[in-house]
Image: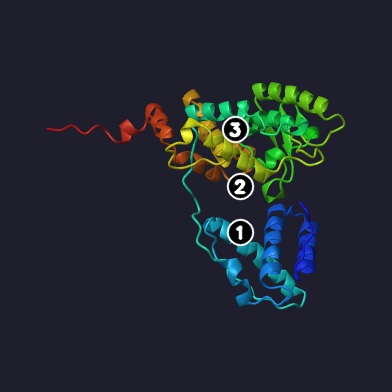
């Protein structure tokens, strides 16, 4: 991302981002928000650098095209910047960021039919303006989306995998500096390992000398954009027949949720004790607790059918009621 800012607040914004990164924060999404804020300030308030309630009024309003969570992210990021600015001896109005957001939105778990339809679109994708770079990326999508579905990786984790962190022999991938700045090792299936090995040879032969990213962007010195990948997922989904009449549109994060449901369903069908396995699954996903992992599952109607078939306790606790 271009790190130049142009408003009267530009020097302070750049100092703030530099400070955050010196503390170990990635600060990519926040930098994007601060670029938007810089543009807002330049258009609405330049050349003044006095931050008042009035000068922020346009920034804190919810936009017609955004949800509460996006509005909160915009305000909270700027709030942190203005607190930093105040600490430098430049008093600034600090906006309130207490916006009620839905904590647990309804989750769309993809069915087998939806998964098949989605990957039919992904596999058949061809760029509108073919070039060596865009054609190469069209070959990256089928592998990348399958990796997310079969491992439950967050999209930001998947796009930033280093080639050196993929171990085909051990069937593992090192995920570095993920959420809460933690590293972890995840396992991949045998089929996924075979696919990644073939793909790894493809990347090395297509971009000789590129030894850093598993999923390089058009500029191979960078990895694919997490935000752009979400947009591409939406494009693929909208082209499927399943998109018509879908009450709750899935997002790329739905692949992560779907992985959890498929995994737990398989354990239940095999008679595996899920209470024993959930902590391992939680660590694999990078969750803080097993409860966070199980939340993905408890909304799924399919789980009730499996539980009903496997349940041997309820009939003993709740005996059949016979009508006289």
Tell me the element at label 3: helix
Dot 1 falls on a residue whose secondary structure is: helix
Tell me the element at label 2. loop
- Specify the farthest residue to the left: 324
Q: So how many labels did they put on this image?
A: 3
Q: Quadrant of residue 301?
A: top left
Residue 96, percent from left and from top: 58, 70
Q: Residue furthest front?
A: 129
Judged left or right of residue 303, residue 95 is right
Tell me which residue sits at (59%, 40%) in the image: 282
x and y percentages locating residue 214 in the rendered image:
76, 33
- Determine whether label 2 and label 1 are within 8 Å by CB: no
Which residue position holds label 1? 73
User: Looking at the image, is mark 3 or mark 2 earlier in the sequence?
Assistant: 3
Q: Which residue corresponds to mark 2?
A: 288
Q: Tell which circle, 3 or 1, labels the residue nearer the N-terminal end.
A: 1
Q: Position of residue 66 (x, y in %)?
A: 54, 56
Q: Disc 2 to disc 1, how far (Cα)? A: 22 Å
Residue for badge 3: 149
Q: Is residue 198 above or below residue 158?
A: above
- Res. 48 visible in picture: yes
Indicate the position of residue 320 as horizontal and vertical percent values: 24, 32
């Amino acid at each position: 991302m271009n790190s130049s800012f142009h408003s009267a607040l530009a020097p302070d914004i750049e100092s703030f981002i530099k400070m955050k990164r010196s503390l170990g924060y990635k600060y990519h999404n926040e930098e994007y928000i601060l670029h938007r804020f810089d543009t807002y300030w330049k258009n609405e308030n330049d050349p003044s650098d006095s931050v008042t309630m009035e000068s922020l009024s346009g920034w804190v309003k919810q936009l017609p095209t955004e949800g509460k969570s996006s509005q909160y992210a915009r305000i909270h990021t700027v709030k942190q910047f203005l607190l930093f600015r105040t600490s430098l001896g430049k008093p600034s109005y600090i906006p309130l960021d207490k916006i009620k957001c839905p904590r647990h939105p309804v989750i769309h778990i993809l069915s087998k039919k939806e998964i098949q339809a989605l990957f039919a679109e992904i596999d058949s994708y061809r760029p509108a303006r073919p070039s060596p770079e865009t054609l190469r990326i069209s070959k990256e999508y089928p592998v990348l989306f399958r990796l997310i579905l079969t491992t439950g990786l967050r999209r930001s984790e998947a796009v930033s995998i280093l080639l050196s962190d993929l171990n085909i022999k051990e069937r593992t991938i090192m995920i570095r500096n993920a959420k809460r700045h933690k590293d972890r090792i995840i396992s991949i299936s045998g089929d996924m390992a075979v696919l990644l090995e073939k793909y790894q040879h493809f990347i090395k032969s297509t971009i000789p000398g590129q030894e850093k990213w598993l999923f390089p962007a058009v500029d191979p010195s960078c990895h694919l954009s997490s935000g752009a990948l979400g947009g591409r997922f939406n494009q693929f989904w909208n082209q499927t027949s399943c998109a018509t009449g879908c009450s709750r549109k899935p997002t790329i994060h739905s692949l992560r949720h779907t992985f959890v449901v498929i995994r737990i369903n398989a354990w239940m069908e095999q008679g595996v004790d899920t209470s024993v396995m959930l902590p391992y699954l939680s660590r694999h996903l990078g969750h803080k607790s097993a409860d966070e992992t199980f939340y993905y599952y408890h909304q799924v109607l399919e789980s009730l059918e499996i539980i009903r078939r496997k349940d041997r306790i309820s009939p003993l606790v709740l005996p059949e009621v016979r009508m006289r």
